[in-house]
Image (spheres, rainbow, N blue to C red):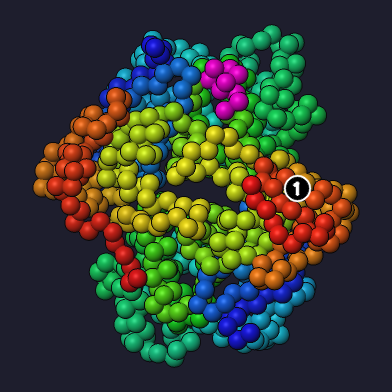
Amino acid sequence: MVKKELLKVTGLKQYFPIKGGLMGRTVNHVKAVDDISFTIHEGETVSIVGESGCGKSTTGRAILRLEEPTEGSVVFNGDELTTLSKREMRTHRKDLQIIFQDPYASINPRQTVADVLDEAMTIQKILPAKQRRKRIIELLETVGLNEYQADRYPHEFSGGQRQRIGIARALSVDPKLIICDEAVSALDVSIQAQVLNLLEELQEEFNLTYLFISHDLGVVRHISDRVIVMYLGKIVEIGDKYSIFENAKHPYTKALLSAIPVPDPKAVKKHIVLKGDVPSPIDPPAGCRFHTRCPFAQDKCKVDVPELIVHEGMREGHQAACHFVEEIENGTLQAAEFEETFFG
Amino acid sequence: METDLLKVEDLRTSFYTDEGEVKAVDGVSFILPKGKTLGIVGESGSGKSITALSILNLLASNGKIVGGEINFKGKNLLSFSDKEMREIRGNAISMIFQEPMTSLNPVFTVGQQISESIIKHQKLSKKEANIRSIELLKLVGIPSPDKRVKQYPYELSGGMRQRVMIAIALACNPEMLIADEPTTALDVTIQAQILGLIRGLQTRFGMSVIMITHDLGVVAETCDFVAVMYAGQVVEYSDIFTLFEEPKHPYTIGLMNSLPRHDVEIEKLEPIRGNVPNPKEMPTGCRFSPRCPAATDLCRREMPELLKDDDGNDVRCWIYSEKWEGEAEVTVYGEKRIAKGHGSETILSD
């Protein structure tokens, strides 16, 4: 089965300059995203996971050119996005929508819900003005809101309902790809489940493709087909959901998964507790960026940048950026300090 | 019983706003045995943080405790004077908060902030307090503590700041630590460090802990007992194993069914319908009844009491009372529970 490539990101870099000194010259860069490549096929959900500062949100914003990427190519549906003019990009945004974490901050508080949706459709010339009201009501019903709520203001809604407005706005222009940037992170568990189910239903109904950016691995496992794990601006592992959650190969992915508390008091609690904090992306460690916290780090890791490749025992499409995947798997390389325990 | 360090009974805390009284906490009862960890779980607005602030009497000026008892080591804290409460705070009972950056003072060094309570409660000199501060920083796993003690909060990472908060909380060897969402703002790998630290310190010093969180994973891993809160009330209080194996209250069951898991595959989430009620317009009867799949007229009419069963687990739900008027076998979010009103004491699971 040949799936259609919808989005192809190649060598994407996003550096933010740090100004300093008397003349305000650029003294250094925050290397938020540093040379990443991946593909998303039509109709699938790909997630980017990682901790704060790993570059997952920046990646989403760079694809939409909300931030101009420093380098690299973003091909959407056959068109190179990075070289488009601002005007051309705007017409393309019809196909690429984004839902943000905090819907209150991303919806104009002085517009009613109907105005918000109408504006999106006006800009993208979706329907003649006369037919839009009907479409607005349809959209609200699609996301589980009611007709009578169309003329209310954002502050009259709860967090979950506001997120539904954000989803309705994204849907209003019939997009192909929706980037969900921590779209359910601010919601309570019971509401989060409602919104996740809604996103799944919409995907089926409208054949949507999602790029789902989240730090919550429970949510990611539930919603994704494939998962990208990022650390300090680099992809450390990529693969289908099963490979990442049941057969992770990169020491960082393993540590990340094992650090999550399991909602079962009888579960065996064995955490790999990583030492220290994530280093600064201004001056990331040489070689493998994870080597400063990796329990398996060798001298090679401090010098050579590992490539993202398929190692032995990995399915097609499952890749990890680590020099020692095989050695860690077969036990020839032992962890220096695998489990750090505190006084216990 | 002497082993109960803290016993809260029917606590009620209200806030008086321009729009009238808001009953933020309205019927909270739980027991924290000595040396154990009690989890208070609930979603935003359930009143879990206000419960904690009520224990220490740290409410905003428009807030007032209007009923109930907070018995700490057999004494009702509500009868304490302001001066007596000051002796308790930061001394016998300490608290750590969610966002360490806003709880630490940006213009004082880490050392000054740890020393403050030591000087106040233990009457040590500045110099002695500084030495003790360095010891505490070392204890909470901060590298080169003699340097860090002179630094300001902005010079530390989020995880480090939370460690400093813990050091401040531990400064006077408290008998009880209240941790209000201590790891919510932190990344999971840092969360694992902090939870490990709290657990380690607890075993070492025999401290009792109240862990306030919305994360059922954190609860499962750290707590011995759990109070589940909904709309200002405790709806279920139970030991940790019973709660996860056999949750009784429909809200607890719904909460667990809403949770996407990273460790097991779940085909379809089953969310709780609707939204949390507005505290200014609480539903009559059971507060969960508008969202509950099993609610009857009785539920919508009358508020259930927190019922105690023989093994010390409590539930605020009509299904488990003699008055239940619905079916004998109740299905709540796909889980079967046997109603008590029909003579059967046992609770089945499928």
Residue A283 seen in this snapshot = no
> Which portion, as a residue range, is magenta?
A200-208
Look at the picture and state if B68 lies above or below B153. below
Residue at 65 percent of width and 70 percent of height? B311
Q: Residue at x 55, y 58 (%)?
A: B213
Q: Quadrant of residue A40 in the image?
A: top left
Residue A262, position as x, y percentages in the image: 46, 52
Q: Position of residue B167 (x, y in %)?
A: 40, 73
Q: Residue at x 10, y 47 (%)?
A: A299
In the displayed structure, does residue B106 sit left or right of residue B344? Answer: left
The tally of labels here is 1
Q: Chain of mark 1?
A: B
Q: Is residue A99 left or right of residue A115?
A: left
The residue that label 1 is drawn on is B330
Residue A30 colored in magenta in the image: no
Of residue B258 and residue A168, the one placed in the foreground of this image is B258
Residue A230 point in image, percent of width and height = 33, 38
Q: Is residue A106 above or below residue B32?
A: above
The residue nearer to you, when weighing A230 against A266, is A266
Identify which amino acid the numbered label 1 is placed on: Val
Magenta segment's dominant SS is: helix
Q: Is residue A69 left or right of residue A174?
A: left
Closer to us: B26 or A116? B26
Residues packed near mark 1 inside 10 Å, few (<14), some (14 to 19) or many (20 plus): some
Name the quadrant of the N terminus of chain A: top left
Where's the C terminus of chain A, which quadrant?
bottom left
Residue A306: x %, y % from top left: 18, 36
Q: Up-down: is A208 above or below B330?
A: above
- What secondary structure is found at the residue carrying circle 1? strand
Q: Residue at x 18, y 39 (%)?
A: A326
Camera sees residue A168: yes
Depth order, front residue of A282/A160:
A160
